[in-house]
Amino acid sequence: MDFVDQKKIIREDFLLKREKLKENFTNENKNELILNLDKFLNNTKYFSIAGYYPIGSEIDCLEILENFQKKGIHTALPFVKDNKFIEFREWRKHDILIEDIFNIPAPKKRSIVIPDLIIIPLISFDKMGFRLGFGSGIYDRSLPNFPKSKKIGLAFSGQLNKRELPVSEFDYKLDAVVTEEDIFIF
């Protein structure tokens, strides 16, 4: 089986798994995830943090971003441009959103942010720090453009793949993944 087929099978399996994990994700689990994120940040001062607009069964990080806003931290959401690269646009709770090329809501106002921290969705991850997304390569292509930004995945603990994910030279390694049960630092 080739590399692409391996990823496709893992993606399908973990998408189904993630849907079930989301259904059973309690407020207590959410609070534990937020506590683990706070532990990971360890009082480090970030001036700007980018998250994502959740789709499907992804963990909703908008509330987390709103909490950062209350602390005076600039927040941003990704906007996928026509060239399939991400730019992070400043976002506040009541800002007008438009759909990007993947029909994902993103800030309409083009106020570009270079985030200190980027929170990234994922379908699965491994103990080496690699993530599996939807397969379009948007994050893998875009993250090298933010060399000073810390990059962390947000996941349900059940999204950990006990085996190493198949990776290519284009797959971008995360700095950490935070779940409701653990903090994985790579």
Image: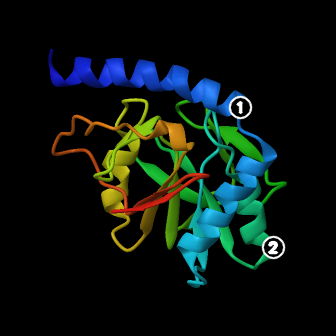
Residue located 22% across and 34% down the image: 166
Q: Secondary structure at mark 2?
A: helix
Query: Taking 131 as reference, is 18 above or below it?
Result: above
- Badge count: 2
The image quarter containing residue 42 is bottom right
Query: Taking 148 as reference, is 151 above or below it?
Result: above
**Residue kind at label 2, given as amino acid type:** Lys
Q: Position of residue 77 (x, y in %)?
A: 61, 54
* Sequence-wise first label, 1 or 2: 1
Q: Position of residue 122 (x, y in %)?
A: 48, 41
Can residue 153 be seen here? The reply is yes
Q: Position of residue 118 (x, y in %)?
A: 50, 61
Query: Mark 2 packing: few (<14 Cα in 10 Å), some, or many (20+)?
Result: few
Checking the image for residue 111, the label placed there is: none
Q: Nearer the viewer, residue 78 or 11?
A: 11
Q: Residue furthest right?
A: 94
> Mark 1 sits on what residue?
24
Quadrant placement of the N terminus: top left
Q: Nearer the viewer, residue 48 or 124?
A: 124
Query: Taking 62 as reference, is 19 above or below it?
Result: above
Query: Mark 1 packing: few (<14 Cα in 10 Å), some, or many (20+)?
Result: few
Q: Position of residue 40 (x, y in %)?
A: 54, 71
- Is residue 151 left or right of 56 when viewed as pictured? left
Can residue 84 be seen here? The reply is no
Q: Secondary structure at mark 1?
A: loop
The image quarter containing residue 49 is bottom right
Q: How is the image coloured?
A: rainbow
Cα separation between marks 1 and 2: 28 Å
Checking the image for residue 70, the label placed there is: 2
**Residue kind at label 1, given as amino acid type:** Asn
